């Protein structure tokens, strides 16, 4: 794939982007529309195939022109993630968007215990989505209910976890645990907010799963299975269907390449 040559965007183009930390998937789509307008494409369609949370990075497929018709099929393909989960605490959103709300014992958690729990969690299952998610309840996003303090119950969703492998064990620390509020990091970049937590055991896990799987829910479920709590400290989508992280462009590079092509 070569952006300097494949420029017939109206005919259809799937651009793999490494989504920046702190951006929503919609932020990336809006940025691509701006870049394409600068190239003279005023009314071209742009969409994405598979939402990534603001605190996640990695493969986000941007569909341009007629490729928007492929978005649903692309979204249905297998996904792979690299997730780091901290044990011994929970947050309302199951990630770093919110501060810790409860703590649990964690001294009993070992590598062997994590590997055993992961093996038992593989397969087709009904998963409870996070309350802080874009799921709709009576036409209202779940996160809107959550922010208002509404007591709601989300229906379980059928997902398939094909494989989970423990890559490494470690510990959190104030220098490595940071929180980025939604929209805090934009195109120019900004420093994430560092929050203070006790040193907690962590596991970095490679996960292969179906569409619609919430990795934040896996963090919650894994913590519970280990008799503790769990939340995500970092998440990267490393593959979406046939597109790998190594093939992805950074947004700043996309802008430089395309605008330089326009000037030739």
Image: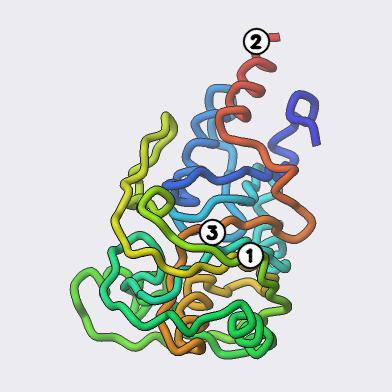
Tell me which numbered mark, 2 or 3, is placed earlier along the sequence.
Answer: 3
Q: Residue at x 63, y 65 (%)?
A: 168
Identify the mark at residue 168; answer none if there is no mark.
1
Decide: marks 2, 1 in contact (CB < 8 A)? no
Label 3 Cα crowd, 10 Å radius (few <14 / some 14-19 / many 20+): many
In the image, residue 204 lies at what x, y percent? 59, 65
- Element marked by disc 1: strand
Q: Looking at the figure, which quarter contains the N terminus? A: top right
Q: Is residue 119 left or right of residue 58?
A: right
Number of the front mark, 2 or 1: 1
Q: Is residue 48 left or right of residue 12?
A: left
Could you give the CA–CA distance between mark 2 and mark 3, rounded to whole angstroms? Answer: 37 Å
Looking at the picture, does residue 59 appear above or below residue 213? above
Describe the colour scheme in one phrase: rainbow
- Element marked by disc 3: strand
Q: Residue at x 61, y 77 (%)?
A: 111
Number of the front mark, 3 or 1: 1
In terms of depth relative to the viewer, which is nearer, 189 or 146? 189
Residue on which the image places disc 3: 235
Could you give the CA–CA distance between mark 3 and mark 1, rounded to whole angstroms? Answer: 14 Å
In terms of depth relative to the viewer, which is nearer, 179 or 237? 179
Residue on which the image places disc 2: 263
Decide: marks 2, 3 in contact (CB < 8 A)? no
């Amino acid at each position: 794939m070569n952006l300097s040559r494949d420029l017939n965007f109206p005919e259809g183009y799937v651009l793999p982007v490494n989504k920046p930390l702190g951006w929503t998937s919609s932020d990336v789509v809006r940025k691509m529309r701006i870049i394409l307008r600068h190239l003279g494409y005023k009314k071209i369609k742009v969409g994405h195939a598979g939402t990534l949370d603001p605190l996640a990075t990695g493969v986000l497929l941007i569909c341009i022109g007629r490729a928007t018709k492929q978005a649903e099929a692309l979204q249905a393909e297998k996904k792979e993630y690299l997730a780091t989960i901290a044990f011994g605490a929970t947050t309302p959103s199951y990630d770093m968007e919110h501060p810790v709300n409860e703590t649990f014992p964690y001294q009993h958690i070992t590598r062997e215990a994590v590997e055993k729990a992961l093996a038992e969690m593989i397969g087709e299952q009904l998963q409870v989505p996070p309350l802080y998610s874009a799921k709709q309840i009576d036409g209202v996003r779940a996160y809107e209910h959550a922010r208002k303090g509404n007591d709601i119950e989300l229906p379980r969703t059928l997902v398939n976890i094909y494989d989970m492998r423990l890559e490494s064990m470690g510990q959190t620390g104030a220098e490595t645990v940071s929180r980025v509020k939604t929209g805090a990091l934009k195109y120019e970049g900004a420093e994430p907010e560092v929050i203070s937590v006790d040193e907690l055991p962590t596991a970095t896990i490679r996960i292969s799963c179906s569409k619609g799987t919430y990795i934040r829910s896996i963090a919650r479920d894994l913590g519970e299975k280990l008799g503790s709590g769990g939340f995500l400290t970092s998440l990267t989508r490393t593959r979406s269907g046939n597109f790998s992280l190594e093939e992805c462009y950074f947004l700043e590079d996309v802008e430089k390449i395309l605008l330089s092509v326009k000037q030739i």
